[in-house]
Amino acid sequence: MASGKKDLKKVRRESERQGWRWDETRNGWMAFSPDGVTKVTIHKTTSDSQHGLENAISEMRKGGFVWKGH
């Protein structure tokens, strides 16, 4: 799946293409689904960034995000 800063950029770029909005917060980012119902927090620093990003993608999928891991 996804890992690292490069993959976070890919996820962000793809989600924005699908209509998601990202706001930077003090501790990371908040991603909002196009319908505004799903909100996902992505932390800047995690003990396991790959696991954290995978969890964020999982939550975003619940809001309609389609990720093919490219």
Image (cartoon, rainbow, N blue to C red):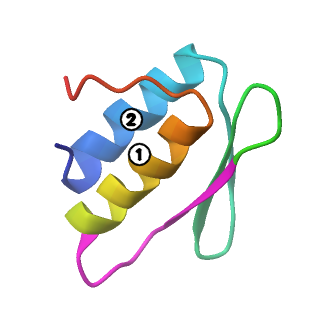
Residue 61 x %, y %: 49, 36
Q: Is residue 41 left or right of residue 7?
A: right
Q: Is residue 69 left or right of residue 24?
A: left
Residue 47 x %, y %: 27, 84
**Residue at (62%, 36%) from the top-left corner?**
63
Q: Earlier in the sequence, mark 1 or mark 2?
A: 2
Q: Give the class, few, some or many, for how many residues have Cα within 10 Å of label 2's Cα (few <14, many ≥20).
A: many
In the rendered image, the quadrant that contains the C terminus is: top left
Please, what is the three-letter code of the amino acid marked with disc 1?
Ile
Question: Could you tell me if the residues under marks 1 and 2 are in contact, i.e. CB atoms within 8 Å?
Answer: yes
Q: Quadrant of residue 28?
A: bottom right
Q: Is residue 51 left or right of residue 30?
A: left
Residue 57's disc is 1
Residue furthest to the right = 36
Please, what is the three-letter code of the amino acid marked with disc 2?
Val
Q: Is residue 45 in the magenta section?
A: yes
Q: Label 2's element?
A: helix
* Label 1, label 2: how far apart the Cα atoms are: 8 Å
Residue 23 x %, y %: 71, 49
Looking at the image, residue 57 lies above or below residue 46 = above
Residue furthest to the front = 62
Q: Which residue is mark 2?
A: 11
Q: Nearer the viewer, residue 41 or 23?
A: 41
Q: Is residue 12 in the magenta section?
A: no
Q: Give the class, few, some or many, for how many residues have Cα within 10 Å of label 1's Cα (few <14, many ≥20).
A: many
Q: Is residue 56 left or right of residue 30?
A: left
**Residue at (54%, 15%) from the top-left corner?**
17
Q: Which residues are magenta?
A: 39-49
Q: Quadrant of residue 54?
A: bottom left
In the rendered image, the quadrant that contains the N terminus is: top left
